[in-house]
Amino acid sequence: MYKLENKVSKEDILKLYTKGFKIPSEFKIGMEYERLPISSSSFKTVDYWNDYGIKNLLEIFAKEETWDYITDNKNIIGLKNKHDTITLEPGCQVEISTKPERTIFELKDKINKLNSALKPITDKMNITLLNYGVSPYTTHKAIHLIPKKRYKIMARYLWGILSDVMMRETAGIQCCIDFSSEEDAMRKFKLANKLTPFMTAMFANSPIRGGVDTGYKSFRALSWLNTDNDRCGFCGKISEEFSFEEYIDCILKTPMIFIQRENLPFEINGDITFEEFLTNGWEGAQATLADYELQANLYFPEVRMRNFIEIRNHDCVGGDLKYAILAIYKGILYNNTAMDECEELFKHLQYKDFSELRFNVPKQTLQASVKKAKVLDYAKEILTIAEKSLKTSQTGEEIFLDSIKEYTLKGLTPADILIKNWNGSWNKNMKKLIKYLSEFD
């Protein structure tokens, strides 16, 4: 703990972001794809340690596909194969993260191949990897944390009333976007933040939780509103004047949860901010670049800056809907004209409007109001802008928008269909819900 470390400077931290600069012809798109592991017969969340649990699933897959283990204190917490990983979120949610690709078609092909390799194993183990945003049956009190030291510390620290729901019950899809310069990064960062409440609304897919209709169309989004306001939400005020340095300052001013020394965690429990740690140290330890990277990973804004932009706010959805998320961001954020049009679309909205939408969208989704319009009106415009841009690029990726247009152009979200069936022909039958969701691979 008291070993002399190389103290970090703000200039060192800044390089973590500037090293992401790419020329536009090298821009790629990436995704992180989480799913809920449930028993195909009982619909309960699958545990880590059981004979037919997630640990054994990872071991079998690693052996059959020759992937390497990712471990924490000798416990398997994921697998890796070159740049691709299969990792576990706190409640055993299974996340696939693949190397970014030039086109969504290439990403889809990789995901399909991984799913094809996983399916015989999950079928044999009676496990369904569910494309859904929140645990449909088992609630957090009955979901054990995986044996990863960081998650136990986070669970003790995070103070929001739904933080355990967020950690143990939810699954989402994240989109990763490149940038060419700080100016380009900040433009995309601000616009991505402004898009987030509309995207949360369009792809809402978590109304049934614990076997009941919660009254929210995205209970996952609600859980994030009640996790930890120090480190969740918008980073900054989505200001017209924003920079890498200001993003870094947001992280520096956030209370620290823990640091790591020689593979051992030392809990700080929010007693100091990273800025104070940087200036004064903590119990003999000086801040290092690795400490900053850990602090940045324990910061959970709607949009997170790395050496790429990580957009984090979508419920897990199945089928081509997950690729529609990528298509919208690619269509808008990789085309200057499309960005111009989106900025024009949002120009009369203020920070408080976007902030209020974050709180209104989990329940009302497309019917939430902003100024004198509905979220639905904006969603349709967003789709139009993205589709026009993708057609201009001549990659054929506009086809991925068809799946979300089936919902949005009718004023619906995936959650609306679930609620209608749940309270109607399914008669609140969990088996019918799971069967419906399982049709969307």
Image (spheres, rainbow, N blue to C red):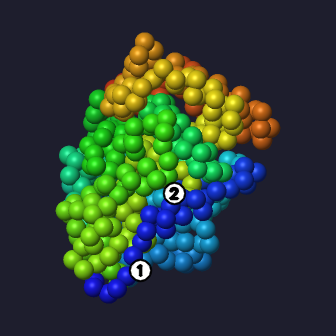
Q: Check the image and report above or below for 253 versus 74.
A: above
Q: Nearer the viewer, residue 53 or 206?
A: 206
In this view, the residue farthest toward the top is 372
Identify the element where label 1 is drawn: loop
Circle on res. 306 = 2
Q: Earlier in the sequence, mark 2 or mark 1?
A: 1
**Left or right: 346 in relation to 372:** right
Residue at 52% across, 25% down: 346
Q: Which residue is mark 1?
A: 6
User: Which residue is at 54% across, 50% downward?
Assistant: 309
Please tell me whether mark 2 sits on a helix, a strand or a loop: loop
| Image point (68%, 56%), residue name | 22
Q: Residue most toward the bottom?
A: 3
The residue under the point 20% across, 46% down is 161
Q: As rendered, which of 261 and 196 lies closer to the eye?
A: 261
* Crowding near the residue tagged with mark 1, few <14, some 14–19, many ≥20 C-alpha atoms within 10 Å: few
Residue 219 in sight here = yes
Residue 335 position (above or below residue 16): above
Kindly report which numbered mark, 2 or 1, lies closer to the viewer in this rendering. Answer: 1
Q: Estimate the spatial distance between the alpha carbons at disc 2 and disc 1, rounded to whole Å.
A: 22 Å
In the rendered image, the quadrant that contains the N terminus is bottom left
